[in-house]
Image (cartoon, rainbow, N blue to C red):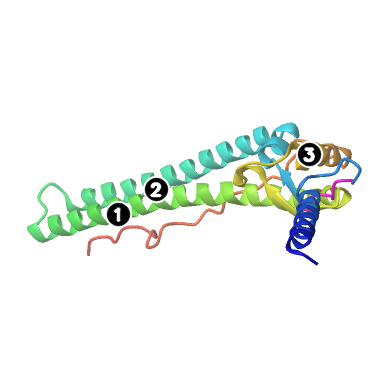
Amino acid sequence: MNLQTVSVLSACLFLTACDKLSSTLAPSGAEPKAAPTVAVLDLAAVAKALGRDEAYKEQVQAAGRQLQQQLSEFTSGLQDRLRQEQEKLGDAPTDEERQQLQRMVVDAQRQVQQGQALARQKALEFQTQLATQFRTEVQPVAAEVARAMGATTVLLSNSVVWFEPTVDITGGVIDAMRARGATSGAPALTPSADRPEGSTGTQGTQ
């Protein structure tokens, strides 16, 4: 075998290898596409389609009003106690009594600030609780729809940079939940009403 024959055979092998590589990289029209293993869900769109976004908004607003009322009642109670203590001192309190009253005022202000912070915390916790409740309700339905298309994982659309529309199961989940009667009648939740630490009232003068 001469050098020219070897060169021709090497060229043929190289071209054959390139053809095989091209066939693995380029999709063939005759071969069916593999089923996607990941599905994408727009949870906000599901909530809106079912009317849950408005229902939860009303619950959050109602909870906010309830927490604000509790805070107002708590603040009013502290102010009443301070007025009572001031009346006890009369028109000519001693320096020690004035100092003690001032300490009570500072303590009352601290309790009000704690109450405001606690109300904000409870409002955020309530919103998180509502979101978690809805996600838990949607999860088995989304899993069922995803399995039907061959997917093994469901990602939320707001955490994905880009995806093919064919892997979006939002419409299927909405239809499935409507078929199960999951409309705007969301279960009602009530925020817990904890009182600020040390909020049993200001200490009276001795």
Q: Nearer the viewer, residue 83 or 131?
A: 131
Which residue is pictured at 11% across the width and 53% down the height?
A: 93
Q: Is residue 36 magenta?
A: yes
Q: Quadrant of the N terminus?
A: bottom right
- The picture places residue 39, in percent across and down from the top left corner, at 75, 48
Q: Is residue 138 magenta?
A: no
58 relative to 201 in the view: left or right: right
CB contact under 8 Å: marks 2 and 3? no
Question: Going by the picture, which residue comes out furthest to the right?
Answer: 30
Give the Cα separation between the discs numbered 2 and 3.
47 Å
- The picture places residue 172, in percent across and down from the top left corner, at 83, 39
Q: Earlier in the sequence, mark 2 or mark 3?
A: 2
Q: Three-letter amino acid code at disc 3?
A: Thr
User: Which disc, if any, is residue 203?
Assistant: none
Circle 1: element type: helix
Q: Three-letter amino acid code at disc 1?
A: Arg
Q: Earlier in the sequence, mark 1 or mark 2?
A: 1
| Dot 2 crowding, Cα within 10 Å, few <14, some 14–19, many 20+ | some
- The picture places residue 156, in percent across and down from the top left corner, at 67, 47
Which residue is pictured at 85% across the width and 46% down the height?
A: 33
149 relative to 87 in the view: left or right: right
Give the Cα separation between the discs numbered 1 and 2.
10 Å
Residue assigned mark 2: 116
User: Which disc, if any, is residue 110?
Assistant: 1
Residue assigned mark 3: 166
Q: Three-letter amino acid code at disc 2?
A: Gln
Circle 3: element type: helix
- The picture places residue 181, in percent across and down from the top left corner, at 85, 39
Residue bounds of the magenta highlight? 32-37
